[in-house]
Image (cartoon, rainbow, N blue to C red):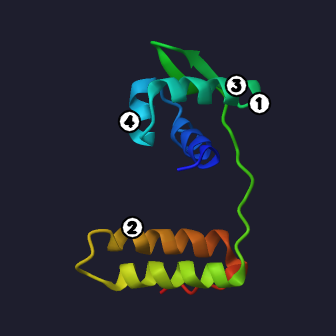
Amino acid sequence: MNRDQRLYDLVQILRDGKLHTAAELSGRMGVSTRTIWRDMAMMAATGIPVEGERGLGYILRTPLVLPPTALTPDEAEVLGEALRLIAEDDAHPRNRAARTLLYKIATLLPQAGLPVD
C-alpha cells in the first residue's frame, strides 16, 4: 500500500471519533508504529485536525468531511453489477450488506441510474 492510500485509510479510521493507539493503527495498516507516528505528524502539519501523542493515541477532534467522489458511468455500472451479484447470492455472507449498500449508492448517486430492486 502506498503512503497516500495509507493516509486516506487512516483518516477513514479516525473519522469514527474514537481514540486509536499507534499500535492498533500500525496493525491495521501493516506498518510500524514509527510509520504511524510520522503519518500522524504529517497529517497534523497539513491541517487535518488529528490530535494525540505517542503512548496515548490519536483522534480527530473535529469532523472531517471529504469531497464527494465522482464516478464515471462505467464505474457506476461496474459497481452496481458487482453489488447486485453479491446481493442476489443467498449463500454469500454479505448479501444483505450488498443490498443496503446498493440502495445507499443509488440514493446518493441518482445520476448513475443504478436500479434498486
Tell me the residue that label 2 is attached to.
97
Q: Is residue 20 visible?
A: no
Three-letter amino acid code at the position of disc 3: Ala
Three-letter amino acid code at the position of disc 1: Thr
CA distance for labels 2 and 4: 25 Å
Tell me the residue that label 4 is attached to.
27
Q: Earlier in the sequence, mark 3 or mark 2?
A: 3
Which mark lies nearer to you, 2 or 4?
A: 4
Q: Secondary structure at mark 1?
A: loop
Q: Is residue 9 left or right of residue 55?
A: right
Q: Nearer the viewer, residue 91 or 35?
A: 35
Tell me the residue that label 3 is attached to.
44
Q: Secondary structure at mark 2?
A: helix
Name the spot of residue 30 as percent of width and height, x first.
42, 40
Q: Secondary structure at mark 4?
A: helix
Q: Residue at x 43, y 33 (%)?
A: 26
